[in-house]
Amino acid sequence: MNHATIMNRVSFLTLAVATTSLAAPLAAQAKDAVKSDDVIISRPGVLPSAVLEMTDEPGKWFKDPKSGGSLVVVKPGEAVLIKMTDTNTDHTITSLAWQPGADKFPVDQEKPSNASVTQTFDKPGLYVFTCKVHPYMFGAVVVDDPKTEGLDIGGELQLVTGAKVPTTSDIAKKLLRTFFVATTPALWRDYRQPKWEVKLPDLGL
């Protein structure tokens, strides 16, 4: 194993440790979340408009089979299937951040399993999912109202810690940066280079 590979792994582990501090309260919050019986595993007559597949691919643990990314965009009232398929271990599908007042949120599978979840999204904005067993895994859904200009990420985020933060706040920006860096291997730091330049998508913040 060469030095560059070791340093890239160190960088990734550093990022994983940093994100764990945010996801650590998940286990404590699970009792207050929607009970596993209330999570929609399947709903007759509801066809998902998008899919996020759980995988073992570094960075792409929640993967859109169409784009290859970890984020899908749907319209209000549409559903997303978070599918346990190409993975060699059990996970939970657990809300990390969501829109305050969204119906059937937060989503939380109490125990690790290989069960998929179909979730309908009623409120425009950003929704982020993780796994309580592997808190470095991230997937996101943006519910975009086609009547508004630009991509809707909502005015506020409800965090699993219980806090609500404006999407224009430094905390929300740091969360978004962490999400895009963790889910985009091309953005992981290469210690062979003197600078770490992170180019994030333009979300209008």
Image (spheres, helix red, strand yellow):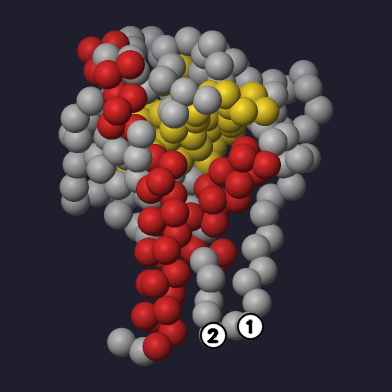
Q: Quadrant of the N terminus?
A: bottom left
Question: In the image as oriented, which residue stretches furthest toward the bottom?
Answer: 2
Q: Amino acid at mark 2?
A: Arg
Q: Amino acid at mark 1?
A: Pro
Residue 168 in the image: state x and y as whole percent.
72, 34
For residue 111, what is the image quadrant? Answer: top left
Measured as percent of width and height from the top left, residue 115 is found at 22, 30
Residue at 56%, 43% in the rendered image: 175
Image quadrant assignment for residue 196: bottom right
Dot 2 lies on which element? loop
Of 122 and 17, the residue lying toward us: 17
- What residue is pinned by disc 1? 194
Q: On the image, which quarter does residue 58 sit in?
A: bottom left
- Give the residue pinned by disc 2: 192
Pinpoint residue 184: horizontal percent, then vertical percent.
Answer: 52, 58
Front in this rendered view, residue 38 or 136: 136
Neighbours of disc 2 within 10 Å: few (<14), some (14-19), many (20+): few
Q: CA distance from mark 2 to mark 1?
A: 7 Å
Up-down relation of residue 167 to residue 135 (above or below): above
Q: How many marks?
A: 2
In this rendering, would 14 be left or right of 42?
right
Provide residue 45's location: percent of width, then percent of height: 38, 10
Disc 1 on helix, strand or loop? loop
Which residue is at 24% across, 49% downward? 87
